[in-house]
Amino acid sequence: MQFSAKTEYACLAILELSLHQNDIRPLRIDDIASRHGIPSRFLVQILLQLKAAGIVLSIRGAAGGYRLAKPADTISLGEVMTVITGDRSNFVQNSNNVTPMSEALFQTWESISQIEQKNLCAVTFEDLLEQTGGKNADMYYI
């Protein structure tokens, strides 16, 4: 399974917003970008997609930024990946000559895709946040 940089950046942004979901102030794009090494201009485009999907909210003004539109325990990896990459479960047979072998291969790929999507939808950003121990990328210990 391979993920694009865009998908990884979207997930990192949602994780960062999840970490700060109870903060009064929204997070600024530059703060998220610098913590995770994401190009700011690229992050803007990603957050606009997530906003259109109802996953994040944008707050305008000097004290503006982004925050989650819903709790982190209701946002799954599968949901974010579908927003960013589209529905990957729709396979189309490329072969012009459908044979029992090509049909078996197609059915197997389709089955694997469904299992993958089910597993991705079972993992929420709250689950991922718990795996980090609630720590963000810029915490250092001496």
Image: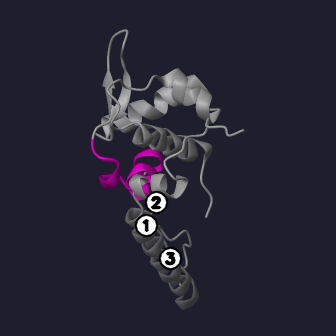
The numbered mark, 1 or 3, whose residue comes first in the sequence reads 3
Residue in front for this viewpoint, 117 or 62: 62
Instruction: Kindly identify which residue carries mark 2.
Output: 88
Most extreme residue toward the top is 62
Q: Amino acid at mark 3?
A: Ile
Q: CA distance from mark 1 to mark 3?
A: 9 Å
- Marks 2/3 in contact by CB < 8 Å: the verdict is no
Task: Please tell me whether residue 78 belongs to the stretch shown in magenta.
Answer: yes
Residue in front for this viewpoint, 79 or 63: 63
The numbered mark, 2 or 1, whose residue comes first in the sequence reads 2
Residue 81 drawn at (x, y percent): 45, 52
Which residue corresponds to the image point at 46% horizontal and 67% vertical from the top-left? 91
Instruction: Kindly identify which residue carries mark 3.
Output: 112
SS type, badge 2: loop
- Marks 2/1 in contact by CB < 8 Å: the verdict is yes
SS type, badge 3: helix
Q: CA distance from mark 2 to mark 1?
A: 9 Å
Residue in front for this viewpoint, 88 or 33: 33
SS type, badge 1: helix
Q: Amino acid at mark 2?
A: Arg
Residue 119 drawn at (x, y percent): 44, 70
- Report whether residue 125 is seen: yes
Magenta-colored segment: predominant secondary structure: helix
Which residue corresponds to the image point at 35% horizontal and 38% vertical from the top-left? 21
Query: Within the image, what quadrant is residue 118 found in?
Result: bottom left
Which residue corresponds to the image point at 54% horizontal and 53% vertical from the top-left? 132
Residue in front for this viewpoint, 52 or 20: 20
Residue 113 drawn at (x, y percent): 48, 71
Query: Within the image, what quadrant is residue 14 found in?
Result: top left
Instruction: Kindly identify which residue carries mark 1.
Output: 117
What is the span of residues highlighted in magenta in the rendered image? 70-85
Q: Is residue 94 above or below residue 52?
A: below
